[in-house]
Amino acid sequence: MTWQEKAAKAGWTPPGAGWHPGLRESYLYDRNVIAEIQRAAREGIYDIRGFGAKRRLPHFDDLLFLGASMSRYPLEGYRERCDTTVTLGARHAEKPLELKIPITIAGMSFGALSAPAKEALGRGASEVGTSTTTGDGGMTPEERGHSKLLVYQLLPSRYGMNPDDLRRADAIEIVVGQGAKPGGGGMLLGHKISDRVAEMRTLPKGIDQRSACRHPDWNGPDDLEIKIGELRELTDWQKPIFVKVGATRTYYDVALAVKSGADVVVVDGMQGGTAATQDVFIEHVGIPTLPAVRLAVEALQELDMHRKVQLIVSGGIRSGADVAKALALGADAVSIGVAALIALGDNAPELEPEYERIGSSAGYYDDWQAGRDPAGISTQEPELAARFDPELGGRRLANYLRCMTLECQTLARACGKSHVHNLEPEDLVALTVEAAAMARVPLAGTAWIPGG
Amino acid sequence: MSTAVAAFDLAETPLRALNQHLHDLAGTSGAQIRVSNPSGAHAVACGIDAEIEVDIDGHVGYYCAGMNKLATVRVHGNAGSGLAENMMSGLVVVDGSASQYCAATAHGGLVVVHGDTSLRCGISLKGGEIVVRGSVGGNSMFMAQAGALVVCGDAGEALGDSLYEARIYVRGSVASLGADCIEKEMRDEHLAQVADLLERAGIGEEVDAGQFRRYGSARDLYTFKIDNAGAY
């Protein structure tokens, strides 16, 4: 079978197919726009989906490293050390998190993900010495058991929140917002509310569950400072406390988080994934990860807190190059969500016939809200979840994390750095005027940083 | 069972020492602790996991008795925001009034406020029970999932907005009901529940369960329906 035949069988239309001389597609009303208007007219409600922003955005791809040359020594690959360790939360916590690699697993709920998928995230992360994070649905014994380092999220919904799990956690993350939907609450549609999920969330089974978007017991940064104080007292000042924000007014949000007493600030750019959110929210709210990193670092430097309060950046981290660039701009670590699910087996080409059956295709599948994931990851259907092998998934995730770490070290050594944290903005140039302005690094071949 | 009362004067002793002492009692029972000069301090007696009794003489700030398990905590004064937030079990009693988000997200236990509470009493309640001898502010029981609120006085605006399965009983007036919250019939089981809660709050003699009206979820917003778009 030719690739064109395969593509046709998969229902994919290659660019140019169906082209007729004289028929011109509108840029403004392209076929996707037309299809969405038709869908909205048919269904009368917004489109809900998973995944992150799909539009083209300025990103780490628009930056390049300047390797070592006459005036800089590179390090020998594989022979000279290039460390990757990260300590998170030493500002106030008696027991900071010690990570072996600068890549963590972002918060994803049991409910959004199946129990074996959560287990695989724990297995993979633990194998390479990094942390996983709970989500909007509480902590399951499986994920606590399989995660050496587990960050427990305190979300507006407070589903399953309890002091025993707080004390069992290795760190606490107060979620103010996430990049896919800054200002929005969680969402879990009825078909994913199984008996176990319903019980953990104290909700009737099968309802369309809307999580709150604001915390129930604090408003604004002055309250947050008191809330953080309570969490420290509750856990005897042992656990690092993270504050996670979706990237919007990032400079101010980071400064306020630091002033509220956070040990670690997590900034999630608009490319950050979600299990279920309105498409209009995913595509139209927030700023990209690229300017968010820079704004966050500026706020930390302004307060003389850079490297004292750690910065974790997420939203579209896919490769060791993305990791290295985020660190060079000043992040202490990054987080992955969507990429971790892909490493587990989401959107696998082997499942193409099954994706077709549910109206999607490998490489496009984003209906994580629907609970019909043939890979057994974003589902609560026991038969689908049982297909997913948590040991194999864990190995794949560990492989992927190792690969990204090696890539990041490769770039750091090329720039002559003995620790990935020694990468700096001076190692970077931008390929586009937009990226140069957002990251505040010069356009390649010039000394020009637009806007500043 | 120890009967000696341990005394903590927060004018002399740091809050950290008090809370550490309370946490070190985890798994024990019977201890009695008396706290003086709280002076509006935040997070007093939070995170207890022991069948003990704590009496606080004076006013407390935010999050007093936060996430309490098993303990009885009595505030002989007023309480600030987030009293007994996310409480799991036990009893928290305030002689005076409590500010916003009283018993927010509480999963269990009983909170008794002898005065009034401010806005959002019982917000996102998950099984806890609340008895307020006075009145509650607006948006009380917003998105409350399970548990019960008994209000002997009046309720402010938007009571029970986006309510799930929690029950609300009000003796006085209700300024307005929130989206998807409706008045429901008071059946024998509900009379019995109110009488039991008033009894456990220690005001069973003084307040007649027969005078309360019941409010609950119409369950119209449980699934997305475009015809309800105006209510979301």
Image: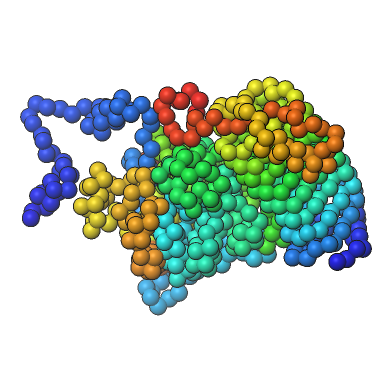
Q: Is residue A190 above or below residue B25?
A: above
Considering only vertical position in the picture, is B177 above or below A410?
above
In the image, what residue occupies the spot 79% across and 31% down?
A: B208
Q: Is residue A368 left or right of residue B171?
A: left
Q: Name the residue rendered at 41%, 59% in the picture.
A: A117
Q: Going by the image, does A348 lie left or right of B34?
A: left
Q: Nearer the viewer, residue A100 or B128?
A: B128
Q: Residue B93's spot in the image, x, y percent?
A: 81, 44
Q: How far across and down, in percent of the image, does residue B65 sit? A: 76, 50
- Quadrant hosting residue B171: top right
Q: Is A252 positioned to the left or the right of A405 in the image?
A: right
User: Residue lying furthest front in this view?
Assistant: B188
The image position of residue A288, as x and y in percent, is 43, 42
User: Does any portion of residue B209 appear in the rendered image?
Assistant: yes
Which quadrant of the figure contains the N terminus of chain B? bottom right
Q: How is the image coloured?
A: rainbow
Res A89 quadrant in image: bottom right
**Residue drawn at x 40%, y 52% as measured from the top left:** A380
User: Relative to A163, does residue A100 appear above or below in the rendering?
Assistant: below
What is the x, y in percent for residue A350?
23, 58
Q: Residue at x 22, y 32 (%)?
A: A31
